[in-house]
C-alpha cells in the first residue's frame, strides 16, 4: 500500500473535489463530484449529527447512486450548501429525469463552526452560494488545510482543517479520504507535536514527527471547547465495485481511522459521520476478502487525512486557536 500520485481522494479515478470558503464568516464547503453517479453509503457514530438525504443511503432504499456528496461548515445553516449544489447539478443536466426535470440526489453533512470568531450576522445565508461555488471549482487538484469545509474548523487545542489522503493497493485498487476535522477531542498526543495518527504516516506527509514517547493512558480527558460545537465528517472512496451494503461496511470500518487519529472520538457531542463512495471502475477479484482489505485501507487513509488536515492548516488574524504549524514551527 502506497500513497497515490496526489495523495488526495481524487487519486480515485473519476472523482473531483471543489472547495469554496468565506474568510469573513470563517466557514466553507467542499463537494465530492463524480464523472457520473456513484454508489454511496453512510455510517454515523457520533451523538450529534447534522445531515441531509442520508436516509436514502440505506441499502434497502430505492436510491442506490448519488451525483455528489457535500461536507460543509455552518451547522444547520450549512445544510443549505447542499441546495446550492443541487441547483448547480440541475443546471448541468445531472440527476434522474422526472417530467422534464433533472433531480440530483446529493447527501450532505455539516460541522459546527459558528463559534470560531467569524462574522455570523448575515441577513442571507451564504451557504447556497458556497455550495454552488464549490461545485464549480471541482477539480482533481484542490487545497487542504484551511480550505473548504475545514476553513473554520477547530479541535480541542489547535485549528482544524480539511484533510485528504490516498492509498493504492497491490491489487491496483485505489482508496482515498476527504475529511473536515472539527472534533471535541485532540489530534495530537498530550502537548504534541506528535499526532495520534503517527503510526500510519507515509512519506512524512504530516511532518515526520514520529510517535510520542509516552501516551497518557491515565489521563481523564476533558473537553477543550464547548460541548455541541464539534463534529468530524468524512468521505472514503474507492474505484472498486461495491454494492451499497458493502460500501456501508467500508464506511463503518473507516471509523476506526477516526478513532486512531482523534482522542476521544465518537462522543455524545460530536456528530462523527463517514460517507463511503464507490465509482465501480474495478471488479472485486476476491469478493468479500477484497472488501475486508478495502475497509482496513479506508481506516488507515482516513487517519492520515485527519492529521494532514490539521498539519496543513494556516493561521489568520483573529484566530481563536493556533495552527499546528504556528505552534510547532511548520
Image (cartoon, rainbow, N blue to C red):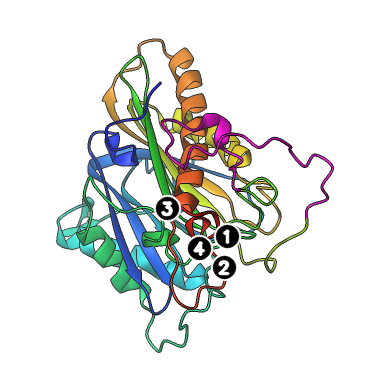
Quadrant into which the N terminus falls: top left
122 lies above or below 37: below
Q: Magenta stretch: dominant SS? A: loop
**Residue that badge 3 annotates:** 312
Left or right of 171, for residue 50: right
Are the residues flagged by discs 3 and 1 in contact, CB closer than 8 Å?
no
Residue 162: image x %, image y %?
A: 42, 54
| Residue at disc 3, secondary structure | helix
Q: Residue furthest front?
A: 329
The tag earlier along the polypeptide, 1 or 2, is 1
Distance between the alpha carbons at the discs numbered 4 and 2 = 10 Å
Q: Residues within 10 Å of mark 2 (few under 14, many from 20)?
A: some
Range shown magenta: 193-221
Q: Residues within 10 Å of mark 1 (few under 14, many from 20)?
A: many
**Residue that badge 4 annotates:** 153
29 lies above or below 164: below
| Residue at disc 1, secondary structure | loop
Are the residues flagged by discs 1 and 2 in contact, CB closer than 8 Å?
yes
Distance between the alpha carbons at the discs numbered 3 and 4 = 12 Å
Amino acid at each position: 500500500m502506497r500513497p497515490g500520485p496526489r495523495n488526495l481522494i481524487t487519486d480515485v479515478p473519476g472523482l473531483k473535489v471543489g472547495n469554496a470558503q468565506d474568510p469573513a464568516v470563517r466557514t466553507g464547503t467542499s463537494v465530492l463530484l463524480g464523472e457520473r453517479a456513484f454508489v454511496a453509503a453512510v455510517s454515523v457514530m457520533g451523538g450529534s449529527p447534522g445531515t441531509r438525504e442520508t436516509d436514502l443511503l440505506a441499502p434497502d432504499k430505492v436510491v442506490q447512486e448519488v451525483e455528489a456528496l457535500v461536507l460543509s461548515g455552518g451547522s444547520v445553516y450549512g445544510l443549505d450548501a447542499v441546495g446550492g449544489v443541487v441547483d448547480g447539478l440541475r443546471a448541468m443536466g445531472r440527476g434522474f429525469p422526472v417530467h422534464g426535470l433533472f433531480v440530483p440526489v446529493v447527501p450532505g453533512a455539516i460541522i459546527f463552526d459558528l463559534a470560531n470568531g467569524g462574522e455570523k450576522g448575515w441577513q442571507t445565508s451564504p451557504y447556497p452560494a458556497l455550495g454552488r461555488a464549490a461545485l464549480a471549482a471541482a477539480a482533481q487538484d484542490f487545497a487542504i488545510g484551511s480550505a473548504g469545509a475545514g476553513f473554520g474548523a477547530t479541535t480541542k487545542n489547535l485549528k482544524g482543517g480539511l484533510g485528504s489522503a490516498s492509498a493504492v493497493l497491490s491489487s491496483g485498487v485505489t482508496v482515498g479520504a476527504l475529511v473536515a476535522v472539527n472534533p471535541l477531542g485532540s489530534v495530537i498526543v498530550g502537548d504534541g507535536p506528535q499526532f495520534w495518527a503517527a503510526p500510519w504516516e507515509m512519506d512524512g506527509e504530516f511532518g515526520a514527527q514520529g510517535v510520542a514517547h509516552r501516551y497518557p493512558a491515565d489521563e481523564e480527558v476533558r473537553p477543550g471547547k464547548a460541548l455541541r460545537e464539534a463534529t468530524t465528517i468524512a468521505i472514503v472512496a474507492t474505484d472498486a465495485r461495491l454494492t451499497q451494503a458493502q460500501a456501508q461496511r467500508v464506511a463503518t470500518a473507516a471509523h476506526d481511522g477516526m478513532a486512531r487519529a482523534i482522542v476521544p472520538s465518537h462522543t455524545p457531542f460530536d456528530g462523527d459521520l463517514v460517507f463511503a463512495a464507490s465509482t465501480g471502475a474495478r471488479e472485486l477479484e476476491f469478493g468479500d476478502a477484497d472488501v475486508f482489505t478495502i475497509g482496513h485501507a479506508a481506516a488507515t487513509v482516513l487517519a492520515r487525512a485527519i492529521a494532514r488536515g490539521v498539519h496543513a492548516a494556516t493561521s489568520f488574524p483573529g484566530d481563536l486557536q493556533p495552527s499546528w504549524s504556528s505552534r510547532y514551527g511548520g
